[in-house]
Image (cartoon, rainbow, N blue to C red):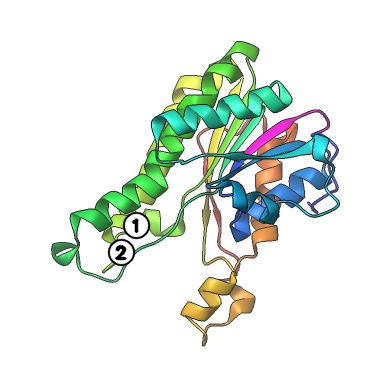
């Protein structure tokens, strides 16, 4: 599937977290190209200019401002989206990150909490905020980004691995609760994503083997489309050739 090939998202409203990130930007572009209206989460008003292309029509794209780790702020993100567009059809949780490098017995509680909050709490709070409006219409899609690292414990990555595994378990739980009510919940397990930050971190790697943000965006579009109506609770590997 090529980004922009589908027209299934005409009149659909997509809420994307991590709107200023490399993956979030690719997802926003993909949905706009496919006819959707997009609300992109940014942390502060000044970030809004970085979210959308200059030629993106204002009636089809909106930055919504809030802190994904704060319960009341997340509720406000859902309200901002509903006020702007009247509905939420798709939630895409791309916000997340990694903090690693120490063995578990030397890991600070601050680092543990940061990883669990950034990668798992944000998924929980955002899903909880949008599910009621999806239930009211008996339809919706929730797609989150876990990681290949969620599948196996590795040295010096304990909090990150655990937080991404939590995303898988949250996905499975929500799917079990919602699949009979018109809502599909799935997640994606990327391998190494080809971003400037990852290239700088491992400059000697073969970047051609990594998965691009645009490729991941295509998988997300598929999961949000009617073609994926029978996929529930899946953790889909998208590793590139890494």
Residue 88 shows up from this direction:
no
| Element assignment for label 2 | loop
The residue that appears at 67% across and 56% down in the rendered structure is: 50
Residue at the top extreme, as displayed: 136
Q: Nearest the camera: 66 or 94?
A: 66
Q: Residues within 10 Å of mark 1 (few under 14, many from 20)?
A: many
Residue 75 vertical placement versus 68 (above, below): above
What is the span of residues highlighted in magenta in the rendered image?
Answer: 10-15
Residue 192's x, y, as percent?
52, 67
Residue at the front extreme, as displayed: 46
Q: Nearest the camera: 59 or 235?
A: 59
Q: Is residue 103 left or right of residue 43?
A: left
Residue 223's x, y, as percent?
65, 40
Check residue 13 for magenta coloring: yes
The residue that appears at 25% across and 54% down in the rendered structure is: 112
Return the residue at label 2. 157
Residue 100 shows up from this direction:
yes
Residue at the bottom extreme, as displayed: 204
Q: In this view, does 13 lie to the left or right of 166?
A: right
Q: Nearest the camera: 235 or 13?
A: 13
The residue that appears at 38% across and 40% down in the rendered structure is: 121
Residue 135 vertical placement versus 43 (above, below): above
Q: Residues within 10 Å of mark 2 (few under 14, many from 20)?
A: some
Rounded to the nearest angstrom, the CA distance separating label 1 from label 2 is: 5 Å
Q: In this view, does 78 lie to the left or right of 14?
A: left
Residue 133's x, y, as percent?
59, 18
The quadrant the C terminus occupies is bottom right
Return the residue at label 1. 160
| Element assignment for label 1 | helix
């Amino acid at each position: 599937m090529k980004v922009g090939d589908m027209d299934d998202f005409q009149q659909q409203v997509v809420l994307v977290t991590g709107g200023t990130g490399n993956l979030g930007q690719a997802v926003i572009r993909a949905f706009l190209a496919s006819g959707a209206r997009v609300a992109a989460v940014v942390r502060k008003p000044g970030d809004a200019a970085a979210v959308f292309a200059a030629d993106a029509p204002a009636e089809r794209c909106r930055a919504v401002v809030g802190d994904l780790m704060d319960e009341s702020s997340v509720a406000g993100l859902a309200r901002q989206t509903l006020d702007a567009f009247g509905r939420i059809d798709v939630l895409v949780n791309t916000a997340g990150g990694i903090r690693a490098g120490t063995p578990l017995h030397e890991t600070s509680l601050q680092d543990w909490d940061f990883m669990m909050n950034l990668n798992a709490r944000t998924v929980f709070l955002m899903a909880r905020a949008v599910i009621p409006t999806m239930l009211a219409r008996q339809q919706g899609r929730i797609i989150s980004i876990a990681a290949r690292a969620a599948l196996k414990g590795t040295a010096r990555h304990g909090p990150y691995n655990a937080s991404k595994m939590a995303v898988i378990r949250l996905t499975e739980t929500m799917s079990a609760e919602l699949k009979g009510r018109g809502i599909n919940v799935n997640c994606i397990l990327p391998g190494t994503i080809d971003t400037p930050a990852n290239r700088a971190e491992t400059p000697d790697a073969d970047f051609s083997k990594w998965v691009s943000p645009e490729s991941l965006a295509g998988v997300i579009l598929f999961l949000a489309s009617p073609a994926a109506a029978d996929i529930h609770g899946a953790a889909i590997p998208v590793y590139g050739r890494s």
